[in-house]
Every structure is written in C-alpha cells, then in structure tokens.
Amino acid sequence: MQNISGSLLKMLNRQQKLIRKRALTALLIFVFILAGIGFIKGAKFVPVIFQYFFHKGIDLKQTKDNKINILLLGVGGGTHEGPNLTDTIIFASLDPTAKKVTLVSIPRDLWIPELKAKINTAYTYGEGKQQGGGLTLSKKVVSEMLGQQLDYAVKIDFNGFEKAVDMMGGLDIDVDNAFDDAQYPLSGKEDESCGLTDDEIASFSAQIATGSATENESFPCRYEHLHFDKGPSHMDGTTALKYVRSRHAIGKEGTDFARSKRQEKVISAFKDKIFSVDTFLNPVKVVGLVNVLRDSIDMDLKDNELDDFVRLMQKMKGAKIVSAIVDTGDESQDRLGLLLNPPISEIFEKQWVLIPRTGAGDYHEIQTYVACVIEGRDCIVGASDILIPTAIPTKNLLK
C-alpha cells in the first residue's frame, strides 16, 4: 500500500512540475512576444523579461490618486466607410488598489467646436498632420472634455478584433434583451447601386436628405438585418462585432446607453478569455494573438513600459467593472441625459450632431458627472445639475 501511495505521490509531483514548466514556458513566450512588438515597430529592444521577473513595481503614468487612465478607440479599418473614424470611444480609469475599472462611453457624434467637427474625426485629423498625431489629438480632446488626465491611448481596428476573438475560440455573452436592427451597414457596400439607375439613385438620395425616405429602405443591398435572441450566446468575432456596433435596434437596445452596456459585456468577456488557461497556456494562440493585434493596434505605450502593462493587466484580473455613458438620456426609463441634439444648421456644418445640454463646448456638467462616477458614487443627472449623494459622516465611536 505504501509503495502504491508513494508511486501515486511521485506521479502527482511530476504532473505538478510539468504544469508549472508549461506555465513558465507560456509566460516566457508571452513576454518575449510583447517585447517583439516594440522591436517590430522599429524601437530598440529592451530587456522586458528581466524587468518582468526582477522588477515587481508598476511604473506606469498615473493620476495623483494612483489611477491609470486609458483612452480606447475602435475604428472600422479596411474597407469600412471612414476607416479611421473612431466608431467606439471609451475612457477607462483603472484603479489597481481597489481592483476597479470605470468605463465611460462617449458618443461619436459629439460636436467639438475646436475641431469644427464631430469627436470621431479627431484621430483621422491628428494622424493626417503627422504619424502618431491621431492618438495625441484624441487624448487631448477627450481629456479636456472629461476634465480627466489621460495617460495612454490604444486604437484597434475591427478587423483585428474579429480575428482575435476567433483565434480565442469565440466569446460567451449573455444577451440581456432580444433585438432587431435592420440598418446594420455592410462593409464595402457603402456605394452599391442596388440595381438602381442613376436617376433613381439621385431621386432616392434627395428623399433621404429631406427625411422622407430612409437609406436602408432605398438601398437595401447596403444593409444587413441583425437579430439577437435573449439569453446565453456563443459568438464568433463577426457576431460579437455586430453585437457591439449595432446602433439602430428597435426599442431600448437602439440607445447609446444600451450599446455601451453591450460594449462592457464584450470587453469583460474578451479580458476573461485572454487570461483564461486555454489562451494563456497555449503558445500557438499567444503567438497568433500578438501577430493579429500587432497589425491592428496603435498605442502610445513605450517599450520599457510593456512589462509594467502586463503586470497591471494581471493585477486587474477579476476587477469590478463599472460603466457610464454620456448621452441624451432615455425617456422610456425616465432617465435624463447630459447631451441634446440641436437643429441641423451651418454652425454644425449641416450635420446631425450632439452637444452638451449646457451649450456647445460647455463640459462642466460632464466633468462633474464623470468625476462622481470614478469616485464610486451613485451619481444622477438631474433636471438642471448633477445630483451627488452626500457622504454619511462616520460616527466617532470613541465619544
């Protein structure tokens, strides 16, 4: 019996050593590839592995209250209409001490007076001025609007997102509400004639401009009808992207608020999948992910910060995610918003835009609201100001 127990114990010890060895190998590969990103982008190679194992601190830029703020930008890329227009704009505030992530979604149609354009043009305009200027200008615009320091920015195109999700075997998402969207644009079909003559196209275009017709009804070949059922759903990259990008769903899922919630779900699922054992301990997946993301990501993270960023992501695993959105509110939910849709005019280049309800370029309410959310309070948008609950004084038990 003792021999059997001893053999079993030795076998278990060998298995544990093998597991530890595989984990260490995968980790080494992962860190090596991160270092390779900087090398491939033309920067000098830095000893990321040495820093990762022997320097335990996290020396990233951070705010005065020890938070790390990151701007997340999603662009269409490829053949999408306006490939560098930021369709998704999310401010993320990471609190490593409290293990909390605050996400604030910003609508792409927000008018920025300084740019004389919508906020989703900032990356394109900045990049057109100089390489790397897209992230710089986007950070500046969002930072001034929210009244928050922005330490880093990351831009990813949707093609890379699809491939990364597929490489990880898809995402498991719990869909809160069933919804339909008949106006989801098909990539590369933006200028399709749908079998119409030039005269018919001109006629339909004029009707669309006056609001007497919709584009998806006039040019059905340019759009796809989406349908999502309520409940658990396993999504591949294409489906997950449609789930977060849908903007014209019928009912409450057609609001920016609902879209923000869907983005939060996918970001959380994506994060969990990356740090799962199946992904992190699979060198093939790790190599594939880095190759995909290397070509799809633009970020202003320095090479000597890569190891700190990896360490930060590991520390934030399992962090609580809190989300908020800057939008026009929702009458059906009796929820007021911070933005409004002004009449189309020359002031806004005859575009459909959103502006703060306090006036174009006046962000003081937005800044108060965002600061309140980051602090973890139950902030409410009132009829004329932000309702912030007063903290209950702590009783002095020594008296």
Image (tube, rainbow, N blue to C red):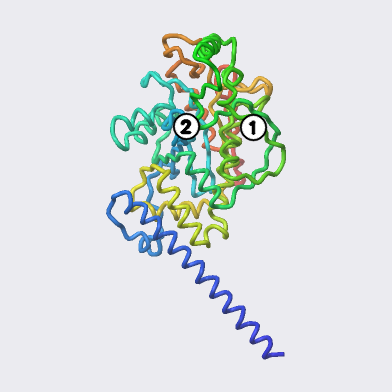
Q: Position of residue 34 (x, y in %)?
A: 40, 55
Nearer-the-camera pick, 228 or 45: 228
Q: Position of residue 326 (x, y in %)?
A: 53, 27
Q: Position of residue 312 (x, y in %)?
A: 46, 52
Q: Which amino acid type is marked by label 2?
A: His
Q: Which amino acid type is marked by label 1?
A: Leu
For numbered disc 2, what is the local secondary structure? Answer: loop
Q: Is 253 left or right of 89, judged from the image as shown?
A: right
Seen at 54% across and 31% down, the residue is 186
Task: Name which quarter of the figure residue 132 lies in.
Answer: top left
Relative to 194, is 311 above or below? below
Q: Is 137 left or right of 217, judged from the image as shown?
A: left
Relative to 285, is 337 above or below? above
Q: Position of residue 178 (x, y in %)?
A: 71, 33
Nearer-the-camera pick, 243 or 198: 198
Task: Name which quarter of the figure residue 177 lies in.
Answer: top right
Count neighbours of disc 1 (C-alpha within 10 A) and say few if under 14, some if 14 to 19, many if 20 or more. Answer: some
Count neighbours of disc 2 (C-alpha within 10 A) and say few if under 14, some if 14 to 19, many if 20 or more. Answer: some
Callout 1–callout 2 Cβ contact below 8 Å:
no
Seen at 58% across and 29% down, the residue is 184
Query: Disc 1 to disc 2, how far (Cα)?
Result: 18 Å
For numbered disc 1, what is the local secondary structure? Answer: strand
Relative to 350, is 292 above or below? below
Considering only order in the chain, which callout, 2 or 1, is on the residue closer to the N terminus?
2
Relative to 384, is 309 above or below? below
Seen at 61% across and 19% down, the residue is 217
Quadrant for the N terminus, please. Answer: bottom right
For mark 2, what is the residue?
A: 80
For mark 1, what is the residue?
A: 226
Seen at 67% across and 25% down, the residue is 250
Quadrant for the C terminus, please. Answer: top right
